Amino acid sequence: MKSVTVTGKTVEEAIGAALTQLGTDREKVTVTVREEPKKGFFGLGGKPAIVEVSEKPDPFTESQKFLHEVTRKMGISIEIDASRKDHDLYFNLSGEKIAILIGKRGQTLNSLQYLTNLVANRFSDQYVRVVLDAENYRERRKETLQQLANRLAEKAIQTNRSVQLEPMPSLERKVIHMALKERKGISTHSDGKEPHRRVIIVPEKNN
Amino acid sequence: MTVKELIETIVKALVDHPDEVIVSEVQNDRSVTYQLTVHKDDMGKVIGKQGRVAKSIRTVINAAAVNNNQKVNLDIM
């Protein structure tokens, strides 16, 4: 994080000069006024304004740095394809030992995603959401979940009993709810407390 | 790479007092136990609601250890 201390005739002027030096914008910095300017008589005895301007850590670069450092310490070399859309930060990881980063049912990827979320939001005024993916794991998982959802919906209808799914993170539960939204004869809801929250498929007559 | 450094990297990015993050290593028969101490105000940050942060840290270091044919434990003191 870069920071500069600059003097100027007025506080605004000093901030302006500091922004030029750092090559950044007003909303990306925090300003501390060290000394208010004092006007002298006839140009004598006046004191300039002194401000300290420092760059706010940016959630996007901080998250990326965090991911690079953590994976390097894990002994896994990866490439990160990073992009952002409004308040969502997307990081797609790829590399040789990517399976280790994904883990069983995406456990490791989800944990790393959760930790990166914390890092990103530490310095952020607005909530940003970090989404980690590894070689399209999320897309493949989504397809698997949709198939599972349809199979279990069928089972719920045929047996006329509720079907409980295993606990899943919120994004995965959403996939199930969405997949069965239009399906007739059943309804879905989630039950339980995080991280043990799970989807339940209920046949309609049983309601 | 060492698991100790990995723990330090993760934890220092989460806490308000990174200078007070201490990780020590205890070698057991078949595994290594890492003991983590942080500033007392940072305890909540490394444990999290219902231990969610601690659980995530453990998952990540376990993945690294498996990659290294090790077995590791993490104690938060």
Image (cartoon, coloured by chain):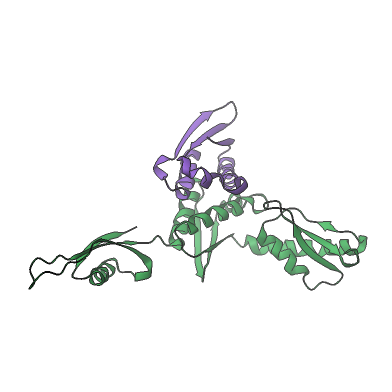
Q: Name the spot of residue B40 as percent of width and height, x first.
A: 47, 40
Foreground of the two, A176 or A92:
A176
Residue ID at (50%, 37%): B36
User: Looking at the picture, does residue B74 appear above or below residue A169?
Assistant: above
Q: Quadrant of the N terminus of chain A?
A: bottom left
Q: Is residue A48 left or right of residue A103?
A: left
Where residue B29 sits, quadrant-wise, is: top right
Foreground of the two, A18 or B2:
A18
Foreground of the two, A51 or A175:
A51
Q: Name the spot of residue B26 as percent of width and height, x first.
A: 52, 29
User: Looking at the picture, does residue A104 appear above or below residue A151?
Assistant: above
Of all residues shown, which one is farthest toward the top?
B29
Where residue B58 sits, quadrant-wise, is: top right
Chain given the colour green: A
Residue ID at (62%, 46%): B50
Residue ID at (78%, 61%): A148
Chain B drawing hue: purple
Q: Quadrant of the C terminus of chain A?
A: bottom right
User: Looking at the picture, does residue B16 appear above or below residue A123?
Assistant: above
Residue ID at (61%, 52%): A99
Q: Name the spot of residue A202 as percent of width and height, x first.
A: 84, 62
User: Looking at the picture, does residue A74 appear above or below residue B77?
Assistant: below
Residue A61 visible in image: yes
Q: Is residue B53 left or right of residue A199?
A: left
Q: Is residue B16 left or right of residue A152?
A: left
Q: Name the spot of residue A24 as percent of width and height, x first.
A: 33, 69
